[in-house]
Image: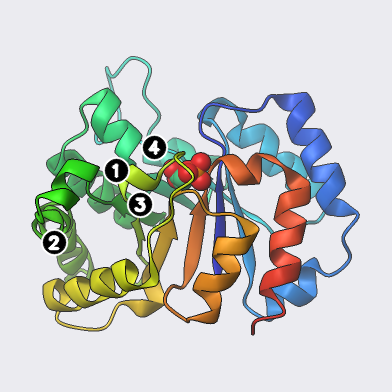
Amino acid sequence: MLMVANWKMNMDRAAISNYLDVLSREERWSRWCSNGYRLVLSPPSVYLDFLACEIRKRELPFWVVGQNVCAHEKGAYTGEVSVDMLRDLGVSGVILGHSERRRLFGETDAHVAAKTALALSRELVPIVCFGETEAERLSKEHAQVWERQIAPVWKEVLKARAAGSETPVYWAYEPVWAIGTGRTAAIDDIREVAGSLREIFGHDCSAGLLYGGSVTDESLAVLVEKGTVYGFLVGGAFLDSEAVLRAFDNLTHHP
Ligand code: 13P
């Protein structure tokens, strides 16, 4: 089970050190890890290197992933970060197509597909976000939205598989109406997602389905108990390292 803390545009070096200091006091990380519970931290790109070094220094078994990557390999793309740069820093994966990138920075389904292809070509694990807005859900278009967002990415995954890639891909259902609003999707909504993905992919993807959107210790425990998802993307709640510890404590009581 993957627990991804998406810090978005928050934290600085002092806050990161404090966060890791709190987590370091916990002695069960390697046990949790060998039982399949993995903490994944996603800082702003300027702190990827710092975070990765601090984690190594403290010998913590956490993975570090980027929040975005450029759709081009290299060259004149001012302000961008490439897949090779992420690899160079020892980053394991990258969040792609987050709704904030789609809504605020004009990222399209085609961009997300291109980024996924590049990530897979460098064995960087893509965490592909998708999800509908409130208006799309109210007009019952949500399943079409998921398909529109996922189908071009899936094509690239199939091409990569045909070329021999075995890098896992995670699919993060993050309904826009649930992000930062305090409203979480219901179990039935998530089951519907799993069903739609099964249709698009032609197979069960439950081993790769993550959920994000106002996840807290409580909502997380309920979703885990019902066995619907393989992990979570957590924004606001996981800016607090104590909340991370509480979540792992809860989770590991629901094997
Ligand atoms: P919140 O947990 O703050 O709703 O954010 C979810 C999210 O966007 C994770 O990527």
Q: Can residue 58 be seen in this view?
A: no
Which of the two labelled residues, at mark 4 and mark 3, occupies the earlier sequence position?
Answer: 4
Secondary element under disc 3, as helix, strand or loop, is loop
Q: Position of residue 231 (x, y in %)?
A: 50, 66
In the picture provided, is 75 more to the left or to the right than 11?
Answer: left
Which of the two labelled residues, at mark 1 and mark 2, occupies the earlier sequence position?
Answer: 1
Q: Which amino acid does label 1 sit on?
A: Gly
Name the residue located 13 percent from the left edge and 77 percent from the top edge.
199
- Mark 3 close to ligand 1, CB under 8 Å: yes
Which of the two labelled residues, at mark 1 and mark 4, occupies the earlier sequence position?
Answer: 4
Q: Where is residue 149 in the image (x, y as percent from the top left)?
A: 16, 51
Secondary element under disc 4, as helix, strand or loop, is loop
Q: What residue type is labelled 2?
A: Ala
Q: How is the image coloured?
A: rainbow
Task: Identify the mark at residue 143; answer none if there is no mark.
Answer: 2
Q: What residue would you read off at disc 1?
A: 97
Task: Identify the mark at residue 68; answer none if there is no mark.
Answer: 4
Mark 1 is surrounded, within 10 Å at the Cα level, by few (under 14), some (14 to 19) or many (20 or more) other residues, namely many
Q: Which amino acid does label 4 sit on?
A: Asn
- Residue farthest along the front direction in this orientation: 138
Name the residue located 25 percent from the left edge and 36 percent from the top edge.
71
Q: Is residue 174 visible?
A: yes
Distance from label 4 to label 3 (Cα)? 16 Å
- Of marks 1 and 2, the one in the foreground: 2
In the picture provided, is 201 more to the left or to the right than 102?
Answer: left
Mark 3 is surrounded, within 10 Å at the Cα level, by few (under 14), some (14 to 19) or many (20 or more) other residues, namely many
Q: Where is residue 156 in the image (x, y as percent from the top left)?
A: 16, 59
Q: Is residue 239 above or below residue 183?
A: above
Q: What residue would you read off at disc 3?
A: 174
